[in-house]
Image (cartoon, helix red, strand yellow):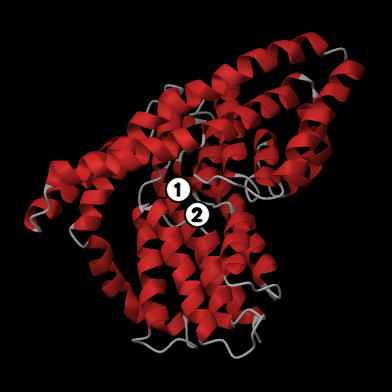
Amino acid sequence: MKNGDIMLNYIWGFIILISVICAIFTGNIEPLSNSILTGASDAINLVITMVGMMSLWTGLLKIADNGGLTYLLAKLFKPVLKHLFKDCPEDSPAMRAICMNITANILGLGNAATPLGISAMKEMNKLNKNSGVASNSMITFVVMNTASIQLLPTTMSILRQKYHSAAPFDIVPAIWISSIVALLVGILLTKVLEK
Amino acid sequence: MSKFSFYIMPCMIGFIVFFGLLKKVPLFDVFISGAKEGLTSTFSIAPSLIGLVVSVSMLKSSGALDIITSFLEPLGNLIAVPKETIPLMLLRPISGSGSLALIDSIFKSCGPDSFAGRVASVMMGSTETTFYAIAIYFGAVGIKNIRHTVPAAILADLTSFILSVLTVRLLFTKSF
């Protein structure tokens, strides 16, 4: 869940203009007018539906984080991750930040993952020999962050519950498979393309 | 499959609470402060959701979404995705709130347990706001030359989209 999406200024304007023009030509102006009225309250319904569960979940995750689960898992992932980030020495602050960011992502600690990721980028930039050009490690790191590796996709489950899904969580195994394979493909591609 | 899925959430909560007790975390105090963060961060997306849900429902009710989808349908058929999810594939890498608005409208019209609803769920859950992540991370260190980041990230997203269809077909064949 992120604010400040980019490119949206144009896309949003474009979507609205296209809709108005299209409605005039296709004679759908009446449904269009109605949809504007319902759309705004639909959005608030969406927020209201999500807010309880999202708060419950961030509260629980904070317990895990305070108990040091992020730190423990980061230590567990390090042996694997060090092979992916060869430009970063094993005990460098860069490596530590990378491990913490990826663990935070897996646990679904979105609010914590982004600042950790930014500090990982800054540390990797210190090790970067060509300033202004992305290093191999940076690219692998960012691509890993553009893939969603999350233990429990809470947002999706809440939304499915809102529309009375018989089993809101039943898509979770499919999400795991799909995201893990996509993550591997992404990592493999960065390794192939860096040569 | 669906019976197993009911274990996921309670077991994770049980584990977190057990782990917190073991590590002597002041459970409820920490929970409250975390929940407060969740409350503010969820409400903080309300303005962008209002803007985007309205624009998505305008796109839909004007008939424009049908026109766009019918143009892209042959392309979608190529990778066998349900046509309702084609707009989602376009918006997902650019806007988190925008794709949430699209998912909401797919669930409303097809239902969350339909084929399109399930594929959309998996697409949304297994991908990220790719361009946002790229912009924020490279922006933070002032790097303009990002080499092969975009093709690698986009191909990974495409892999997720194709796999969403495959996994849903594989795991839920009985339901359709």
- The answer to whether residue A185 is visible is no
Q: In which quarter of the image is residue B67?
A: top right
Kindly state the secondary structure of the residue where label 1 is placed: helix
Tell whether A120 sits left or right of A62. Answer: right
Residue B72: percent from the left, percent from the top? 80, 41
Residue A98: percent from the left, percent from the top? 41, 73
Q: Residues within 10 Å of mark 1 (few under 14, many from 20)?
A: many
Residue displayed at 57% across by 67% down: B140
Judging from the image, mark 2 belongs to the subunit labelled A
Residue displayed at 82% across by 13% down: A28
Which numbered tag is attached to residue A178? 2
Judging from the image, mark 1 belongs to the subunit labelled A
Which numbered tag is attached to residue A32? none
Residue displayed at 70% across by 28% down: B55
Q: Which amino acid does label 2 sit on?
A: Ser
- The answer to whether residue A46 is visible is yes
Mark 1 to mark 2: distance in Å? 6 Å
Contact, mark 1 vs mark 2 (Cβ under 8 Å): yes
Tell whether B164 sits left or right of B76. Answer: left
Residue B60: percent from the left, percent from the top? 72, 24
* Up-down relation of residue A89 to residue A104 (above or below): below
Q: What residue type is labelled 1?
A: Ala
Which numbered tag is attached to residue A174? 1
